[in-house]
């Protein structure tokens, strides 16, 4: 609890002033060296040696910023886990030289920076690994898009080449085995389509001019049109992704740069105190630290935006991939049907090709690609054994849409949203009708049925959030940098009239008082060097007012500047005066003379 406020007409006892003046100045010594692990070798229980020494000699905790609410009450947050010692109600406030306290605070800040640097190094390694993984996954995705475009272009090129070669002879219809390489980069489903076409053309020996347009020209034009659309999509996603990755890389480098600037500001402040020089307000590490904190928040926002955009891009890719597969299958089916109509001697081969083409499951092809290495992270599955009777499952496609209460599935823990991946060790069909028919067949056989479920359907690598930077050091450094924070009213004069404006004031452990327009402002409206100032009460201006007279120097010589503030309550006035006096050279409080 703060001591009872003194009356406006009282002044400090003369004995106390003589005793203060008789105290010798505390010598300034270099801070003890900090070991690599961020703690002192002479520490006990994991705390720094300098911190333990302060606790042993004075019993005081590390100074923490003092926040003030609207009623003027003081809210204090300490860095140490131990509660601060309670001060007696009538005991005088302890006086500790400001330079000693600032040196101790600077040592704490430097220790925290050393520890944070090691944590930052580990975090940066994780970030680098994460973004390398993202780039590899996107490269694989882009290769898939280009391979699909290449398949369509090759298809159109082969059709045109076949049309030209068919004019000479049926033996040149295979173009020297070019069809054998068609579709080599596709999945199993579309590759089976390509192989079927190759086998069918082995039995074709005649060419009819009447089917030239239907068999060659129209499919080739549609394939080129689809390939062009895929090329536009590929260029779009490549441009957007590279732009996002470039912006994220810039923001990451900017956050690291701001952190380095804050460390440099701390070192510069340490050198100023060692040389007993006055530090400029703009060089206060608190301002550099606020800029670093803002850049970290901006980095997190950009990472969240990246995840959202990449998720949308993946959904659009899957839609386009299915459309491309359907178009390619449709073109092949149309060409095969045309061949069947005009090649009577190859009717049997054509019928077999159509049966194989219609039996290809394109959904399985795409699902297999989704489960390929590098596109899924931490897949979660569950193997469940069912008896050959009703299971109580409702599903659409391979996704579980409902589980009947009391059924086998409900008892064994199957939940809505699971996906059926395998049945008795084999990949499950993609359609719900095919899955239902397969389960009915297995139940009639009377043997147990083993089903492998995917418990987490949204497992794409682009859905995984990036690792966020640790922010524990931000709170520690905020508490170490600020000595007192709160709201004060500042007096300003315009045209001979005085007015009061509410301001947010911060007294840093550098001995500088920053006056800001609001709590969220990152730059100060004005800054006061408390080491070069004198404080005095101003009861004639307002009963809760005080003035700070700051010594200034400039091009035209030295002078003084007076800053006038007031609080809402008398207790708040006492608290602010006591906190400001800790950083003054004289430590005296005067009462403004009546004019």
Image (cartoon, grey):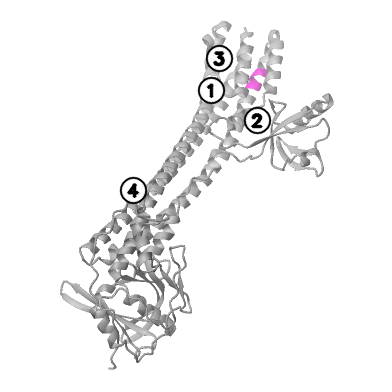
Mark found first going from the N terminus, 1 or 2:
1
> Residue 363 has which mark?
2
Question: Closer to us: mark 1 or mark 3?
Answer: 1
Residue matched to label 4: 36
Q: Please say whether residue 335 is one of the residues in the magenta stretch.
A: yes
The correct choice, above or below, for 368 with respect to 299 in the image is above
Residue found farthest to the bottom: 595
Disc 4 to disc 2, C-alpha distance? 56 Å
Pointer 4 local density, CA inside 10 Å: few below 14, some 14–19, many at least 20: few
Residue 339 in the image, given as x and y percentages of width and height: 66, 15
Residue matched to label 1: 185
Question: Closer to us: mark 2 or mark 3?
Answer: 2
Query: What span is in magenta?
Result: 332-337
> Main structural element of the magenta stretch: helix, strand or loop?
helix
Task: Give the camera-side residue of 567 and 66.
Answer: 66
Query: Is residue 61 visible to the viewer in this orientation of the structure?
Result: yes
Residue matched to label 3: 179
Q: Which of the 4 image quadrants contains residue 323?
A: top right
Residue 132 in the image, given as x and y percentages of width and height: 44, 37
Residue 499 in the image, given as x and y percentages of width and height: 37, 83
Element marked by disc 3: helix
Mark found first going from the N terminus, 1 or 4:
4
Q: Quadrant of the C terminus?
A: bottom left
């Amino acid at each position: 609890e703060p001591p009872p406020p003194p009356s406006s007409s009282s002044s400090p006892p003369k004995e106390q002033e003589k005793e203060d003046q008789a105290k010798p100045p505390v010598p300034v010594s270099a801070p003890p060296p900090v070991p690599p692990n961020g703690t002192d070798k002479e520490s006990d229980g994991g705390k720094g040696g300098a911190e333990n020494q302060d606790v042993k000699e004075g019993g005081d905790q590390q100074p923490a910023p003092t926040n003030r609410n609207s009623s003027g009450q003081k809210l204090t947050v300490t860095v140490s886990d131990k509660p601060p010692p309670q001060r007696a109600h009538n005991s005088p406030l302890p006086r500790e030289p400001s330079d000693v306290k600032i040196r101790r605070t600077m040592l704490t800040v430097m220790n925290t920076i050393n520890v944070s640097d090691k944590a930052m190094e580990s975090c940066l390694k994780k970030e680098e690994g994460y973004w390398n993984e993202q780039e590899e996954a996107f490269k694989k995705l882009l290769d898939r898009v280009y391979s699909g475009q290449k398949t369509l272009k090759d298809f159109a090129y082969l059709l045109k080449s076949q049309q030209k070669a068919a004019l000479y002879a049926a033996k040149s219809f295979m173009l020297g085995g070019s069809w054998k390489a068609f579709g080599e980069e596709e999945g199993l489903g579309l590759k089976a389509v390509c192989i079927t076409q190759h086998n069918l053309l082995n039995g074709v020996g005649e060419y009819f001019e009447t089917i030239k347009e239907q068999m060659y020209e129209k499919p080739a034009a549609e394939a080129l049109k689809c390939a062009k659309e895929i090329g536009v999509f590929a260029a779009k996603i490549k441009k957007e992704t590279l732009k996002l990755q470039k912006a994220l890389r810039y923001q990451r480098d900017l956050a690291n740069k701001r952190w380095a600037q804050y460390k440099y500001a701390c070192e510069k402040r340490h050198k100023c105190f060692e040389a007993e020089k006055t530090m400029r307000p703009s060089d206060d590490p608190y301002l550099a630290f606020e800029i670093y904190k803002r850049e970290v928040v901006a980095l997190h926002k950009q990472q969240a935006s990246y995840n959202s955009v990449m998720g949308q891009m993946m959904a659009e890719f899957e839609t386009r991939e299915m459309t491309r597969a359907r178009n390619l299958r449709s073109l092949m089916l149309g060409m095969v049907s045309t061949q069947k109509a005009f090649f009577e001697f190859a009717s049997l081969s054509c019928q077999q090709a159509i049966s194989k083409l219609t039996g290809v499951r394109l959904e399985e092809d795409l699902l297999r690609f989704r489960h390929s290495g590098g596109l899924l992270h931490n897949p979660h599955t569950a193997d469940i054994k069912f008896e050959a009777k009703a299971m109580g499952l409702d599903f659409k496609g391979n996704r579980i849409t409902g589980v009947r209460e009391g059924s086998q599935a409900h008892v064994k823990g199957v939940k809505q949203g699971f996906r059926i991946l395998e049945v008795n060790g084999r990949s499950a069909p993609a359609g719900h009708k095919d899955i239902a028919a397969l389960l009915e067949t297995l139940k009639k056989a009377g043997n147990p049925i083993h089903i492998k479920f995917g418990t987490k359907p949204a497992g794409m690598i682009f859905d995984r959030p990036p690792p966020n930077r640790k922010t524990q050091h931000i709170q520690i450094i905020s508490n170490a940098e600020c000595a007192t924070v709160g709201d004060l009213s500042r007096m300003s004069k315009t045209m001979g009239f005085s007015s009061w404006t509410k301001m947010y004031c911060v007294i840093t452990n550098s001995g500088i008082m920053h006056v800001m327009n609001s709590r969220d402002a990152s730059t100060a409206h004005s800054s006061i060097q408390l080491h070069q100032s004198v404080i005095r009460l101003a009861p004639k201006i307002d009963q809760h007012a005080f003035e700070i007279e700051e010594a200034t120097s400039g091009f035209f010589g030295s002078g003084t500047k007076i800053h006038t503030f007031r609080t809402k309550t008398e207790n708040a006035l006492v608290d602010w005066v006591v906190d400001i006096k800790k950083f003054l050279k004289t430590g005296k409080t005067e009462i403004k003379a009546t004019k």
